[in-house]
Amino acid sequence: MPPRSEATDLLQAWSNGDQSAFDKLVPLVYRELRVLAKQYMRRERADHPLQATALVNEAYIRLIDVNRIQWQNRSHFLAVAAQTMRRILVEFGRQRNRQKRGGDAVRVTIEDAHDLAEKRGADVIALSDALSALATFDARMSQVVELRFFGGLSVQETADVLKVSPETVMREWKTAKAWLLRELSHPAAH
């Protein structure tokens, strides 16, 4: 893995139209996306039909098609990649939920449903919806969660992307986690 400054230099050169920088960046970008995809897929159910490689490929295609974004640095790239992967998983989940009855749907009794829900934890769609709700009254707090949870960025990297202090990131991270926990624990209340 090249040093972070090399990745940043390549991203910025590519933003400025240097095609050779893009050619050097491709292997680095793919590895970074693979790390993010593995983090995402660890949070999914074990039998999820989408594999990390497919998630990487879809995100890679979407990121390549981004129109002349001015990449600031590696952290900025990871933030955009995290948003892209979250959107892919949410789209996949929503598409899957739209399917008619039957198929590979698991049938459970009403008594089993409560136990099943507790075991599954927060699913990506519910978390995405909660993040959207959080963004309506505090967009930066929502971004902190997206960068830290989905993007895997450190406190310092998140602070750099958002141009705030690490202390602000930590304060908003703690507040957002508490708010999201409450939202995801009582989804029917909304």
Image: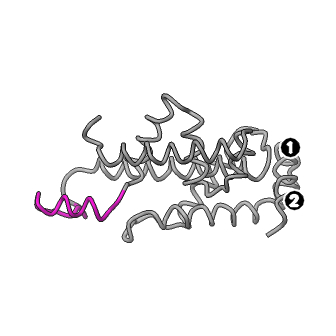
SS class, disc 1: loop
Q: Position of residue 123 (x, y in %)?
A: 38, 54
Q: Is residue 162 above or below residue 95?
A: above
Q: Quadrant of the N terminus?
A: bottom right
In this rendering, the label closer to the viewer, 1 or 2: 2
Taking depth in this image into account, of 17 and 1 the one nearest to the observer is 1
Q: Position of residue 70 (x, y in %)?
A: 79, 39
Amino acid on which the number 2 mark rests in the picture:
Glu
Taking depth in this image into account, of 90 and 178 the one nearest to the observer is 178
Q: Which mark is residue 32?
A: none
Question: Residue tagged by mark 1?
Answer: 17
Amino acid on which the number 1 mark rests in the picture:
Gly
Residue plotted at (72% across, 60% down): 29
Q: Is residue 4 above or below residue 190?
A: below
Question: Residue tagged by mark 2?
Answer: 6
Answer whether labels 1 and 2 touch (C-beta < 8 Å).
no
Q: How is the image coloured?
A: one colour
Q: Residues within 10 Å of mark 1 (few under 14, many from 20)?
A: few
Give the residues drawn in magenta, as a range. Answer: 103-121
Looking at marks 1 and 2 on the same chain, the residue that comes earlier in the sequence is marked by: 2
Apparent side of residue 49 relative to residue 167 in the rendered image (left or right): left
